[in-house]
């Protein structure tokens, strides 16, 4: 039998604690009760609660502002804990302020028991998912030699989960994605999670060298094989023997060199330039490209037999514009890395306005661009604790809004328009009840409130 989840129920109303505490215990939860802020802090600090149900108006003063301050303090101490604020003072202003501070949801008394149980279960499911994500992130960070791979969005998790699953095998891996998405970092993680982790990881950018030099770099050469070959050179295939060879920008390789790489992969034999006898090597291949290899196949620019040889498992790293949920995490990660640039040595924070600008930007340069922006903004912020929009190199209005012209909207814009229409229809159908609307749409109340703000439906 699984251990029940511990919940902390904080409310000064003894009848409320008795009724709803009993309801939660009957549902299989372990409930710890507190009646005021001091006892709540003591219980909260004593053990790990994945979820806290918190009344804003608590003794000793009973003010909502003090309750919001306590919420912010507790969230800062254990940011992984989810808070459901339950209060009789549930007007829109307090709701939005609690959500802005980081509350998972906000329920107004009297609380529907069924709604409470649904919200509690969803919050706990979210905690479980986030802890699994953190475990995976820690694993991949360790695998990548301590270089953090940050993200919790669905597209990012799909890529890293696939990489984790394929790492232990010797299957070739093809990592696709735009420039700046972190393809080499993921390749290193796959190598260091594999059985070859003690062997070398040897990367080369196939687009950085002309064909003649690339062939020599890959296969090696013997002394005197061409002008300037003053000594034997092993080549990267030989250097990667027993480990992993990472061919970055594979799509830039010429067709004639593709033939030689294909033979090396099929036979395990490489022939150094100018040599008479082949050399046997044992390498695991990981490739990456920002090009559309499928289209290159159709155009005859890439060999089909090599394509199927390198594409054992394809892992697509999403561009940053498809990872909006990861932007705050990534920005914070890069700002922490830039703390040494600050006069006081403390990492800068993003203001709400700057965060909105980040979300509105299209990020054509992906992670490289975001890292540069956070470095630049840190320096320009100077003594200020918070980064403002004027510290960024863009206005934050580059991402186009949905168009009403038929056929003019992008897929993302059409999805956004459809999402707004679905929310409006659900609100209309449920007479504006936000809790019921969130349930009908499969969202948390906090998630719905954020979307309402985004679409200007507040």
Image (spheres, grey):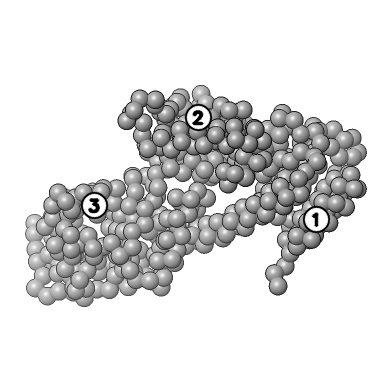
**Quadrant location of residue 239?**
bottom left
Q: Horizontally, is 184 left or right of 349 in the view?
A: left
Q: Answer whether labels 1 and 2 touch (C-beta < 8 Å).
A: no
Closer to the chain start, of discs 1 and 2, is 1
Mark 2, other Cα within 10 Å: few <14 / some 14–19 / many ≥20: many
Q: Which mark is residue 23?
A: 1
Residue 357's disc number: 2
Apparent side of residue 165 relative to residue 39 in the rendered image (left or right):
left
Q: Secondary structure at mark 1?
A: helix
Where is residue 108, by image quadrant? Answer: top right
Quadrant in which the N terminus appears: bottom right
Q: CA distance from mark 1 to mark 2?
A: 44 Å
Work out whether mark 2 precedes mark 3 in sequence or the reverse, and give the earlier one.
Answer: 3
Residue 117, above or below 349: below
Q: State yes or no: discs 1 and 3 in contact (Cβ < 8 Å).
A: no
Measured from the top left, where is residue 172 in percent x and y? 31, 65
Foreground label between 1 and 3: 1
* CA distance separating discs 1 and 3: 57 Å
Q: Label 2 vs label 3: CA separation? A: 34 Å
Pick whichever, 430 or 90, lies toward us: 430
Report whether residue 140 is seen: yes
Mark 3 lies on residue: 293
Whole-percent x and y of residue 304? Answer: 18, 59
Please tell me which residue lies in front, 139 or 322: 322
- Compared with residue 431, is residue 151 higher up or lower down, i.e. above or below? below
């Amino acid at each position: 039998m699984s251990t029940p989840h511990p919940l902390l129920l904080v409310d000064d109303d003894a009848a409320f604690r008795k009724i709803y505490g009993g309801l939660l215990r009957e549902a299989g939860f372990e409930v710890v009760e507190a009646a005021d802020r001091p006892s709540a802090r003591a219980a909260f600090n004593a053990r790990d609660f994945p979820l806290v149900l918190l009344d804003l108006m608590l003794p000793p003063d009973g003010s909502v502002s003090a309750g919001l301050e306590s919420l912010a303090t507790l969230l800062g101490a254990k940011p992984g804990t989810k808070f459901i604020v339950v209060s009789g003072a549930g007007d829109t202003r307090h709701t939005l302020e609690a959500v802005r501070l980081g509350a998972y949801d906000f329920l107004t008394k009297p609380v529907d028991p069924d709604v409470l149980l649904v919200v509690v279960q969803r919050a706990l499911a979210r905690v479980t998912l986030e802890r699994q994500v953190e475990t995976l992130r820690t694993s991949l960070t360790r695998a990548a030699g301590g270089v953090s791979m940050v993200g919790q969005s669905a597209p990012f998790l799909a890529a890293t989960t696939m990489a984790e699953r394929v790492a232990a095998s010797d299957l070739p891996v093809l990592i696709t994605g735009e420039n700046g998405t972190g393809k080499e970092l993921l390749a290193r993680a796959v190598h260091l999670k594999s059985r070859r982790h003690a062997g070398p990881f040897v990367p080369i950018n196939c687009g950085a060298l002309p064909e003649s030099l690339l062939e020599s770099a890959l296969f090696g050469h013997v002394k005197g094989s061409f002008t300037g070959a003053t000594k034997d050179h092993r080549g990267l295939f030989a250097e990667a023997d027993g480990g992993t060879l990472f061919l970055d920008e594979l799509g830039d390789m010429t067709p004639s060199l593709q033939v030689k790489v294909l033979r090396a992969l099929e036979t395990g034999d490489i022939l150094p330039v100018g040599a008479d006898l082949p050399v046997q090597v044992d390498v695991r291949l990981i490739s990456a490209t920002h090009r559309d290899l499928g289209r290159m196949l159709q155009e005859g620019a890439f060999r089909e037999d090599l394509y199927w040889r390198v594409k054992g498992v394809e892992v697509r790293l999403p561009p940053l514009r498809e990872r909006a949920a990861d932007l705050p995490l990534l920005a914070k990660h890069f700002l922490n890395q830039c703390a040494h640039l600050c006069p006081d040595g403390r990492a800068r924070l993003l203001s709400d306005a700057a965060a909105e600008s980040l979300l509105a930007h299209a990020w054509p340069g992906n992670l490289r661009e975001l890292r540069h922006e956070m470095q630049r903004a840190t320096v320009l912020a100077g003594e200020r604790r918070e980064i403002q929009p004027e510290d960024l190199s863009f206005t934050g209005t580059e991402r186009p809004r949905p168009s009403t012209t038929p056929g003019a909207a992008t897929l993302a814009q059409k999805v956004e328009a459809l999402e707004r229409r679905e929310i409006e229809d659900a609100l209309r159908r449920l007479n504006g009840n936000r809790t019921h609307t969130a349930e009908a749409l499969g969202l948390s109340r906090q998630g719905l409130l954020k979307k309402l703000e985004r679409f200007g439906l507040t």
